Image (cartoon, helix red, strand yellow):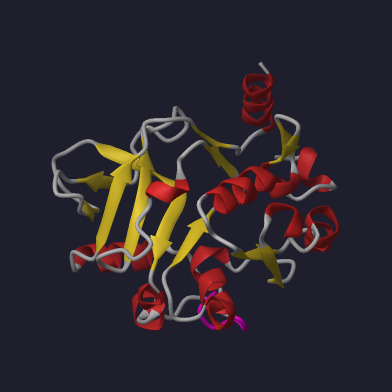
């Protein structure tokens, strides 16, 4: 996303007249969620001044600065567990835009995770996971694969075995630990503990200046 992110963190880049993260906050509030944890890294000191305490959306915001090097999604969840507590929680990547109705997601998934999946974008044609007819999500199968949208509901149990699953990687030995979520998801999938739904509406992985410009044009149309 450079040069755009040289001075602005990706979730604060503007599309359709407001930062990407504000679209998320509005949808979270509309779904009845009132408390949000925001993990920050690069240029993280910009978030609190830009967003305030969340009162304008009826939210209470908690900011956790991970340091200059992001902890990735798995490490970020582990680091935020003292605030997240023991109840299931919703995770949204800060660099996507979607019109998914968050109220359609289960508040308590039957397993360890419930994922939103979308049709594969041009930049990721092979997809990530398979959504079966019974709602189960797996990493194998003959069906067409879909792409993880960066939106999901998780139980804290998804993190329980993180050290055994991740192994002795450089990130695992860091303080705080740094590791991705995908290995943990595949571990849970192997036990049949991940479900999902196919979102057929709008979704964009805002990974390049060109895709951001296209999204901005569409939202302003």
Vertical comparison of 29 with 18: above or below: below
Task: Please tell me whether the stretch drawn in magenta is mainly helix, strand or loop.
Answer: loop
Vertical comparison of 110 with 8: above or below: below
Vertical comparison of 109 with 75: above or below: above
Name, please, the residue furthest toward the top.
Answer: 221
The quadrant of the picture occupied by the C terminus is top right
The quadrant of the picture occupied by the N terminus is top right
Question: In the figure, is residue 210 to the left or right of 196?
Answer: right
Residue appearing at x 42%, y 35% in the figure: 124
| Residue 7 pos. (x, y %) | 85, 47
Is 172 included in the stretch rendered in magenta? yes
Question: In the figure, is residue 211 to the left or right of 142?
Answer: right
| Residue 86 pos. (x, y %) | 44, 81
Residue appearing at x 61%, y 81% in the figure: 176
| Residue 122 pos. (x, y %) | 44, 27
| Number of numbered discs overlaid on the protein picture | 0
Residue appearing at x 24%, y 53% in the figure: 139
Is 49 included in the stretch rendered in magenta? no
Magenta extent: 171-176
Choose top left, top right, bottom left or bottom right for residue 18: top right
């Amino acid at each position: 996303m450079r040069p755009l992110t040289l001075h602005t963190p990706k979730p604060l880049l503007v599309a359709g007249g407001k930062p990407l993260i504000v679209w998320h906050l509005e949808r979270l509030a509309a779904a009845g969620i009132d408390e949000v944890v925001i993990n920050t890294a690069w240029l993280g000191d910009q978030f609190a001044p830009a967003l305030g305490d969340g009162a304008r959306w009826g939210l209470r915001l908690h900011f956790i600065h991970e340091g200059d090097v992001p902890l990735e999604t798995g490490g970020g969840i582990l680091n935020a567990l003292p605030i997240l507590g023991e109840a299931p929680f919703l995770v949204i990547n800060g660099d996507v835009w979607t019109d998914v109705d968050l109220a359609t997601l289960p508040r308590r998934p039957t397993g360890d995770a419930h994922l939103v999946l979308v049709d594969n974008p041009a930049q990721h044609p092979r997809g990530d996971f398979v959504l079966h007819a019974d709602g189960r999500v797996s990493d194998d199968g003959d069906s067409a694969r879909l792409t993880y949208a960066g939106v999901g509901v998780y139980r804290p149990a998804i993190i329980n075995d993180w050290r055994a699953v991740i192994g002795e990687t450089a990130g695992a030995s860091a303080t705080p630990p740094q590791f991705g979520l995908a290995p943990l998801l595949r571990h849970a999938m192997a036990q049949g503990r991940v479900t999902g739904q196919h979102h057929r509406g709008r979704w964009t992985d805002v990974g390049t200046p060109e895709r951001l410009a296209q999204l901005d044009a569409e939202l302003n149309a």
